[in-house]
Amino acid sequence: MSLDKVKAFFADCGMADRIREFAVSSATVELAAAALHCAPCRIAKTLAFQAGEQTILIVAAGDARIDNRKYRETFGVKAKMIPPAEVEVRTGHAPGGVCPFAVPEGTLVYLDESLRRFETVFPACGSSNSAIELTLPELERCSGAKEWVEVCALRE
């Protein structure tokens, strides 16, 4: 189970007790914000893309959307989301619980600049009813992010 892998991952960091599990779904930005009683923009959603065989995860603010031009300029390829049927195989997590933790080796994780507005954010923890509150330095360290990128635009 994906949540168990993420719990084990955070146990190694001494942070497993910070994972929150909900009796309700947190599978979308709106549902996660309701479960956490926070603004949707503070949800750190993880978007899964493919570039050939390479899996790319972009962690972005809940109110951000991928800007195709910026994505292409940054990665040199068109933004192509992983089809839902392949998400779990490629990321280690099912849709609704995709996160940048305990992912398959070789998965590239990037943090979008849209997150920098916040002291803390709430990424999922491998299930459709879990999250953890992390500071940006904690998110950077725990996700193993390759780097910060600017591939999103904020919704107006």
Image (spheres, rainbow, N blue to C red):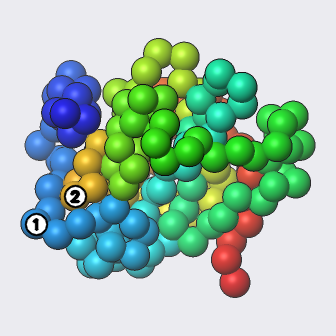
Residue 36's image quarter? Answer: bottom left
For residue 99, which quarter of the picture? top left
Residue at coordinates 47% horizontally, 15% vertically from top-left?
105
Write the residue at 65% across / 22% down.
Answer: 53
Q: CB atoms at circles 1 and 2 under 8 Å apart?
A: yes
Indicate which disc residue 23 carries.
1
Classify residue 121 as left or right of residue 26. right
Residue 147 location, x and y as percent? 65, 33
Q: Which residue is mark 2?
A: 129
Residue situated in front as seen by the camera: 71 or 61: 71
Residue that protrudes farthest toward the front in the picture: 85
Q: Position of residue 19 (x, y in %)?
A: 19, 48
- Characterize the local packing of mark 2: few (<14), some (14-19) or many (20 or more) Cα atoms within 10 angstroms: many
**In the rendered image of this protein, does residue 42 appear above or below residue 110?**
below
Rounded to the nearest whole Å, what is the CA distance between mark 1 and mark 2? 7 Å
Q: Quadrant of residue 24?
A: bottom left
**In the current view of this chain or complex, which residue is farthest to the top?**
105
Q: What residue type is disc 1 on?
A: Ala
Q: Is residue 13 left or right of residue 39?
A: left
- Labelled disc at residue 9: none
- Mark positioned earlier in the residue sequence (1 or 2): 1
User: Which of the pair 13/153 is nearer the observer?
Assistant: 153
Q: Secondary structure at mark 2?
A: loop
- The quadrant the N terminus occupies is top left
Quarter of the figure with the C terminus: bottom right
Q: Is residue 126 left or right of residue 120?
A: left
Question: Is residue 53 shown to the viewer in this render?
Answer: yes
* Residue 131 visible: no
Q: Residue at x 87, y 54 (%)?
A: 69
Disc 2 marks a residue whose amino acid type is Asn
Q: Is residue 143 above or below residue 35?
A: above
